[in-house]
Amino acid sequence: MAKTLTPQARTQLLTLLNQGDLAALMAIPGIGEVRAKGIQKARPLADVTNVVSVDGIGEGIFAQMVAYAKAGFPQPEKKAPAKKKSSPKKADAQGFKQPSKGRFGPPLAQSGDSRPISA
C-alpha cells in the first residue's frame, strides 16, 4: 500500500507522523485523540509503514492514511454550528413554570384553577 505513494507524499506523511501535533494527526481520517497520542508515543518512526505497530492502527487505518496522503492532505471540512433548540420556560422558586399567554386567551392560574387570571 505504501508503495503507491509518491516519494514526496511518503516524505510528507512521515513528517506528519513524526512531527505533527495532536490536531494535525487527528485531521488524518480514522485517527482520533487516542490513536494520535499513540502515534506520538511511538515516535520516531523510521518509515510510514511502522505506524501499523501503534495500538489501534491496522491495515484499514493505514489505507486511509495513504489515501489521505494521495489526496494531498486535504483539510477537514468545518461543520456549521448546530442550531440551538429553544430552551424550556424557567421555573420560579417554587418550581412552577411561568404561564404564557396561549392562543386562546389569557394564562390560567398556577394553582390548577381553570379560570383565567384577572388583570
Image (cartoon, rainbow, N blue to C red):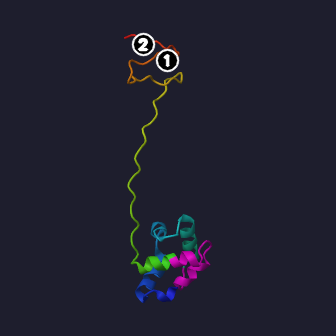
Q: Position of residue 66 (x, y in %)?
A: 48, 80
- Relative horizontal placement of residue 103, taking residue 93 as reference (left or right): left
Please tell me which residue is depicted at 56% across the width and 79% down the height of the picture: 51
- Relative horizontal placement of residue 25, taking residue 52 as reference (left or right): left
Q: Is residue 8 magenta?
A: no
Distance between the Cα atoms at labels 1 and 2? 9 Å
Please tell me which residue is depicted at 48% across the width and 25% down the height of the picture: 97
Q: Nearer the viewer, residue 43 or 14?
A: 14
Residue 110 is marked as 1
> What residue sits right under mark 2 in the picture?
117
Query: Which quadrant would the C terminus be assigned to in this image?
Result: top left
Tell me where the magenta segment starts and ends, as one range: 44-63
Q: Quadrant of residue 69?
A: bottom left
Q: Quadrant of residue 84?
A: top left
Please tell me which residue is depicted at 45% across the width and 76% down the height of the picture: 68
- Tell me the amino acid under the disc marked 1: Gln
Give yes or no for contact between labels 1 and 2 (Cβ–Cβ under 8 Å): no
Q: Is residue 51 magenta?
A: yes
- Tell me the amino acid under the disc marked 2: Ile
Q: Position of residue 94 (x, y in %)?
A: 53, 21
